[in-house]
Amino acid sequence: MLDTQFDVVILGGGSGGYACALRAAQLGLSVALVEKDKVGGTCLHRGCIPTKALLHAGEVADAVRESEQVGVLATLQEVDLEKVNAYKDVVVSRLYKGLQGLISGRGITVISGSGKLVGPRTVEVAGTRYEGRHLVLASGSYAKSLPGLEIDGERVLTSEEALQLTAVPERAVILGGGVIGVEFASAWRSFGADVTIVEALPRLVAAEDPASSKAVERAFRKRGIRFLTGTSFSSVEHTDKGVRVSVEPGDDYEADLLLVAVGRGPFTDGLGYDDQGIAMERGLVVTDDRLRTNLDGVFAVGDIVPGMQLAHRGFQHGIFVAEEIAGLAPSVINEAGIPRVTYCDPEVASVGLSEPVATERYGADAIETLTYDLGGNGRSQILKTQGFVKLVREKDGPVVGVHMVGARVGELIGEAQLIYNWEAFPSDVASLVHMHPTQNEALGEAHLALAGKPLHAHT
Ligand SMILES: Cc1cc2nc3c(=O)[nH]c(=O)nc-3n(C[C@H](O)[C@H](O)[C@H](O)COP(=O)(O)OP(=O)(O)OC[C@H]3O[C@@H](n4cnc5c(N)ncnc54)[C@H](O)[C@@H]3O)c2cc1C
């Protein structure tokens, strides 16, 4: 084989692309991974990891502010964003180093540079053509804006520039109350900023169960995070000190900056996908449930495939495609079984169907719900967090949705996803013992109650 010919050529080294590369190499395939920036992609360098580091720093700041509530007398001096960034950057660079080690350890050829499809399974990088028996498209996504709303990178930012701020804004307006919007709102509020979220939909985190949105809104109100739901953005203008953001029907909000968090678009333009005849829909690559495009031997993974834009979905896509190429016939990925966590304070975690979706799918009479309040959970009381575990089940059937709100509930999603994906009945979970006192116990208690034998809950 020439060194420009591989079993698998992967275009893009983010979560989807590098996971595919690692698994394919493990399965004995020769792999070329084309990356124009840094392997690890959005999640590692501009997404999941840096934002969670900011949110953790925010949690520490809040813990100091609220320390007196637990009898510890401490005073918060200031949040030094440059030092927060240094901490965040160390986390990212350690993981980046580790990932590079994994990639080279598995004998994957990394081709640095911008790749373009010039044949059905040929990618050109800086004049050299790389051919794959199989091609995997994994070019990821970019932060979208609205028509006419220009990102200048200084006062009107996307999440990418927001991660590089060197000082905490005094006042910020955030356009978009989805996952990215509420996570920045939460972190910046913890750092002391005055935050206003503008969201066109009727509720924050609108992809979640309505009960979760309500709980987040209640908590944000308490935290002094202002949010305007059902409100459309009309314009932004620069002022001496920052920006003036106007919303329908005519109110203005002055702030140091505007963060635009209105979603992410697929990064597929100008990469030769269209020219090679790959079927696309609104810029996304159309695949079947085995992640095959319409071209033989060409697959797509991650954010460019219609569905939720999550790193672990990308990992799973990548592993799936590598195994498919190696002939292992992996099981099709169930999109609803992919866990979701929004890492604001309080956290929101879910897997499976929301109550409205389950109602639509099974009919209102065929489902049952149960909400267990974290007020009854010792560990949550110790942490002084409020929230709930809400279960949705098919009557006389398995649990089809788990929804949780509260500090640290993201860590409970592991068990919740097993319950959903293994189609457990409430009685199956009720017979398993949960450690006391943990927040995990709340999940056990909810299932005990739904199985008809509540312990620390009113009947
Ligand atoms: C602020 C923020 C926070 C997030 N938080 C979370 C979270 O907490 N949990 C979670 O699950 N998800 C989170 N996400 C989403 C997550 O980052 C994405 O779902 C994930 O990175 C998608 O992986 P991907 O491989 O499809 O694309 P990407 O990670 O975007 O990778 C695509 C790669 O392809 C490369 N590329 C593109 N075109 C070319 C080309 N022509 N030639 C060579 N290389 C190319 C890019 O440089 C990039 O490295 C977050 C995203 C953002 C923006």
Image (cartoon, rainbow, N blue to C red):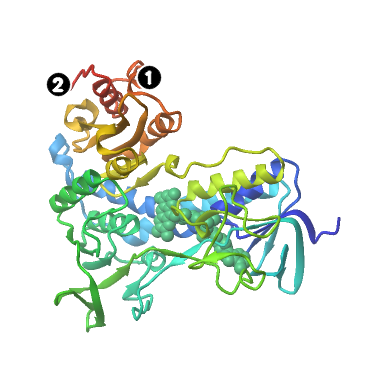
Picture residue at 33% right of the left edge, 38% below the top: 362
Residue 130 drawn at (x, y percent): 76, 64
> For this view, does 187 lie left or right of residue 248?
right
- The image quadrant that residue 151 belongs to is bottom left
Q: Amino acid at mark 2?
A: Thr
Which disc number belongs to residue 261? Answer: none
Q: Amino acid at mark 1?
A: Asp
First-in-chain label (1 vs 2): 1
Mark 1 → mark 2, Cα distance in angstroms: 20 Å
Query: Which residue bears the numbered disc 2?
Result: 459
> For this view, does 394 lie left or right of residue 63?
right
Q: Secondary structure at mark 1?
A: helix
Picture residue at 29% right of the left edge, 32% below the top: 366
Residue 318 visible in rendering: yes
Mark 2: give few (<14), some (14-19) or many (20+) Cα within 10 Å: few
- The image quadrant that residue 419 belongs to is top left
> For this view, does 448 lie left or right of residue 18?
left
Residue 37 visible in rendering: no
Q: Is residue 22 above or below residue 419?
A: below
- Foreground of the two, 451 or 383: 451
> For this view, does 402 lie left or right of residue 143?
left
Q: Is residue 210 above or below residue 11?
A: above
- Foreground of the two, 62 or 379: 379
Picture residue at 50% right of the left edge, 57% below the top: 303
Of the 4 image quadrants, the one containing the N terminus is: bottom right
Residue 258 drawn at (x, y percent): 28, 71
Query: Which residue bears the numbered disc 1?
Result: 428
Q: Secondary structure at mark 2?
A: loop
Residue 353 drawn at (x, y percent): 35, 41
Of the 4 image quadrants, the one containing the C terminus is: top left
